[in-house]
Amino acid sequence: MVGAGWAGLAAAVHACEGGCRVTLFDMAPQPGGRARSVVLPAGGTLDNGQHILIGAYRETLALMSRVGIDIDSLLLRLPLELRYPDGRGLKVAAGPPLIGFALGVLTARGWAPSARVRFLRTAWRWWRNGMRNPGVATVSELCVGLPERVQAELIEPLCVAAMNTPAHEACATVFLRILADALFGAPGGSDLLLPRAGLSELLPRRAVQWLEQRGATIVFAKRVLAFEAAADGRLLVDGESFDSVVLACPAGEAARLVRSIEPRWSAQAGALRHEPIATVYLRRPGPVLSLPMLALRTGRDNPAQFVFDLEVLGPSSATLAFVVSGAGPWLADGLDALVQRVRSQALRELPTQFGGELPTVLHASAERRATFACTPGLQRPSMEVGPGIFAAGDYVEGPYPATLEGAVRSGLQAARRVLQTAA
Ligand SMILES: Cc1cc2nc3c(=O)[nH]c(=O)nc-3n(C[C@H](O)[C@H](O)[C@H](O)COP(=O)(O)OP(=O)(O)OC[C@H]3O[C@@H](n4cnc5c(N)ncnc54)[C@H](O)[C@@H]3O)c2cc1C
């Protein structure tokens, strides 16, 4: 396996359970890839970006259990609630998903009765259509006719949170699929699962221990540079010979590794466009937030869509994490400019939490290639790269946008193919 992100770890655990002798390489000194904790230069740890999971992440939760993680102690489960600092917004009620959603809409604070009814009618139409075949390309087109407030306070934040792509560019088909799984799927699918510990504790560290206890070889700080198919059908990873290889590194790196042996696959993977996400961690001298996560109003000078209270959640005291998904337009002026905007936005929206003073920055990070841009008609590279070579990663063809669940599912799928070829 090349890459010990969530996809590579899922693939390694499944292959190991299936009886394979697994070797896992990662160029970083630790596992987790884009979803890991980082040690700050000034001491302490924070995540390389605030993450949320949802109840519909079935395979991710099952994988965490398989490696011995106590999910309830590491994830705070809450009914989906998109609440703004002024109390407006919506909470999905407990119980059967359709009823919980309808009740949530009917009791949403700040929406006119006519807006609630129009939204319910539209959602009913989507549901009757099987949450498929939207007949339009983008999420904005899908939502034409919905009241502006519903679009701004619900659709836009959900879309950018789930797909990291703004509604006017995001694929309507994928959006409907996410809604189908989360809002209208199994009970609890829409629940928010908020990390109570650093991301490395959620899966990466424990998965590595689990693998090592079962004899897997794990090599960190080793960037795989060369990959060749040998004449005897085996595969050479920097000269070391293997029966099959799972490329669980990001699309661009997988494309580089197979450029000469699988040029068509390489061209497709290399052509994916990416979207950045920035996270700004600010010290909160005042009281904790009313909820662990709040939605924020966005605009030119208000880049962040969500804020998380890491003290309420557990990992860090007096710290708020502001998340800017689809951060491209704000990063065009540089990370510093984005941070200054977030500080001003934070003070405007949460004056009590910051005691009326511009907040102090604890840490800011921008992951330029956080996820692929989930746009209409996108052809994603397949898991089958070539004989004995499989790709795993959040970008590989599959039902989900770039998410932990997409990465884990694709890792499991690649490992199943490795086991089939070995049989
Ligand atoms: C800031 C941010 C916020 C996010 N928020 C959410 C969220 O709230 N919910 C959610 O579900 N998803 C979220 N995501 C997406 C999620 O993090 C990713 O979808 C997931 O982590 C991708 O996992 P992966 O294993 O496919 O790839 P990666 O995590 O990129 O793993 C690839 C691994 O390959 C290694 N590697 C690369 N090249 C080589 C090489 N040549 N040799 C050896 N090793 C190599 C890398 O070091 C890395 O460890 C977020 C992402 C970011 C960046």
Image: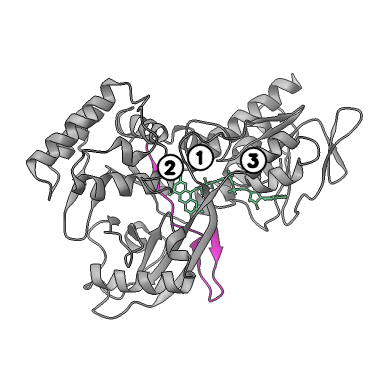
- Closer to the N terminus: mark 1 or mark 3? 1
Of the numbered discs in the image, which one, if any, rests on residue 72?
Answer: none
**Which structural element holds mark 2?**
helix
Left or right for 80, reference 260: left
Depth order, front residue of 62/209: 62
Mark 2 residue type? Ile
Can you identify the residue that label 3 sits on?
269
**Residue at 7% in and 41% down:** 113
The yes-or-no answer for disc 1 within 8 Å of ligand 1 is no
Tell me the crowding category of disc 2: few under 14, some 14 to 19, or many 20 or more residues within 10 angstroms, Cα based. Answer: some
Can you identify the residue that label 1 sits on?
64
Mark 1 residue type? Met
Tell me the crowding category of disc 3: few under 14, some 14 to 19, or many 20 or more residues within 10 angstroms, Cα based. Answer: many
Left or right for 215, reference 139: right
- Closer to the N terminus: mark 3 or mark 2? 2
- Closer to the N terminus: mark 1 or mark 2? 1
Disc 3 vs disc 2: Cβ atoms closer than 8 Å? no
**Residue at 17% in and 30% down:** 121
Q: How far is mark 3 from mark 2, CA to CA?
A: 34 Å
Would residue 17 be seen by someone viewing this image from the given angle?
Answer: no
Q: Is residue 370 above or below residue 12?
A: below
Depth order, front residue of 152/419: 152
**Residue at 76% in and 42% down:** 259
Q: Is residue 304 above or below residue 42?
A: above
Position of residue 25 measured from the top left corner of the image (x, y, whole percent): 73, 47
Residue 255 sits inside the magenta stretch: no
Mark 3 residue type? Ala
Can you identify the residue that label 2 sits on?
71
Q: Which image quarter is the C terminus in?
A: top right
Position of residue 70 measured from the top left corner of the image (x, y, whole percent): 45, 43
Q: How far is mark 1 from mark 2, CA to CA?
A: 7 Å
Q: Which residues are magenta?
A: 37-55
